[in-house]
Image (cartoon, rainbow, N blue to C red):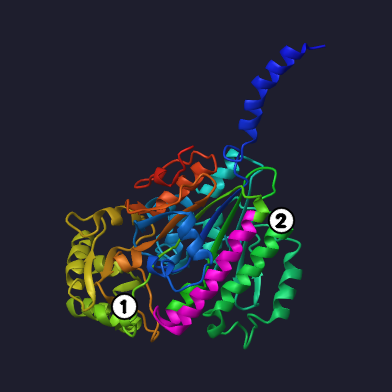
Amino acid sequence: MIPFRALRMLVYLIFPIVLFLGSPAQAAVRLGVVVVIDQMRPESLDRSDLPDGGFRRLRREGAVFTDARHLHIPTETGPGHAAISTGRGPAVHGIVANDWYDRVAGTETYCVADSAYGIGPEHLRGPTLADALKASSPRARVFSVSGKDRAAVLLGGRKADLVLWFDRFSGEFTTSPYYRRPSWLAAFNAELKKKNLLPVRGGRVPKDLIASPAYDAALDLLISELIARERVGRGPATDLLLISYSGTDLVGHRYGLEVPEMDAQLRSLDLILGRLLKRLEKASGGSLALAFSSDHGAIPAPEDASGKALGVRRLDWDAFGASLEKTMQEKWPLPNAPWILSNEIPHLYLNRRAAEGRGLEWNDFLDRAAKLLSGVDGVAAAYVPGEKGAPFPELTRRSYDPGRSGDLFVIMGQNVLLHDMVPGTSHGTPWDYDARVPLIFWGRGVRAGRTASPAATVDLAPTLGRLLGLDYPLGEGAAVRTEAFAASR
């Protein structure tokens, strides 16, 4: 039998160790979360007229970076979500745009097109936070959901347990054969259709319903079901839940930023986020760390009050593309073929076979074409990627993939909106209104406060990784935002 004095001394020695291991501040985080709002400007998050929902709670309790931005071109959904998930630029992760021109096939390809599975991560290169978590902890689970397939796939990566998105033709949430289809999804879709939030009419869900609060409301129902069915936050190791709400982007494209439709969307989303935070706290027992950002911003439409103040002007997409081709044809007449094989602004793919067939040396031809197209109305700069003295050298270097990027980069002028849906808006440029986005960390291990330190979306993966106890390798231009950490870390 152990003497009482010795037993007491043993308890004194062991108790601090047990307390340390069992301390919520030091225990492994049970749930990591990434929340992306498609097409969200920082100003939308800072609105003071919204009730005390998710936006205000994130601002009040989170580490808020007020000068965060994307470090790539173009600022689109595909590259933006890939930057968030990988902590790297398109030069590494390979998602150079939503769509790009395949020079070998001679056709455009979609960023999450998959030759074997239809939709999948085939085009995504480099590491992702989700894949790194699975590699470091085989029992970790990854769930990714969105209204858009490209958002769900690019966040979820290659090894996700579930990747789900909304199919506008069937009016249901679906997945790809690349991923597991959960057994509960059919019953959920049946219930969703009973609610009649997003009914199919004429072979697809109407655009006015897609561009409405109903879109994210349907995703909210899916997330609730997912958390309950898969016991998210209660797995054998850390779970990672990746969410991308698509509704704000669709409302912005259709209606603009400063309109009643966007106000209704943001108010609805604020309530959805408020419920989500409470739901996640309950699911994880409060053991969670969350990162919040956006894949891109947007330019105010010419019809918006701020758009009028800035002097924003709208250019029709097809007419602008025709003006580029016309300019090329006037300089080098080519009666039976186009000079521009594919216009995926900022990527412009030119007809090399035609140039060389006319005896034009390719590199010299590109230089001359860039100078020529720089003078087209609405263009700020057209240049050969990597050319000395070209604008945006760092952004271009991080964005350029020789096999996928265009022969020329074409940057639209400031306050020029290339979008033909009146009164809607768009994005894609490196200008502040497209590149600046919110960046917030919230939850366990986070110190609340606002900081004006320059930050980037490529910081999200390594910083959240650190909060989850994962040492995720830094990509170029990325940093672990230690300003977000509580002192105990």
If you read the primary sequence from the N terminus, does the residue marked by circle 2 or circle 1 appear first? 2
Q: Main secondary structure of the magenta part?
A: helix
114 vs 47, left or right, is right
User: Residue at coordinates 62% horizontally, 37% vertically from top-left?
Assistant: 23
The residue under label 2 is which amino acid type? Answer: Glu
- Is residue 371 visible in the rendered image? The answer is yes
Query: Quarter of the image containing the N terminus?
Result: top right
Neighbour tally class for label 2: few under 14, some 14-19, many 20 plus, Cα within 10 Å: some
Q: Identify the amino acid type marked 1.
A: Leu
Residue 206 forms part of the magenta stretch: no
Q: Dot 2 corresponds to which residue?
A: 230
| Quarter of image, res 99 | bottom left
Q: CA distance from mark 2 to mark 1?
A: 43 Å
Residue 126 shows in this picture: no
Identify the magenta region.
Answer: 253-281
- Closest to the observer, 316 or 280: 280
- Residue assigned mark 1: 417
Q: Is residue 437 left or right of residue 309?
A: right
Residue 298: image location, x then y, percent = 37, 71
Res. 209 image quadrant? bottom right
- Position of 180 relative to 343 (above/below): above
Q: Residue at x 69, y 49 (%)?
A: 234
326, above or below 357, in the image: below
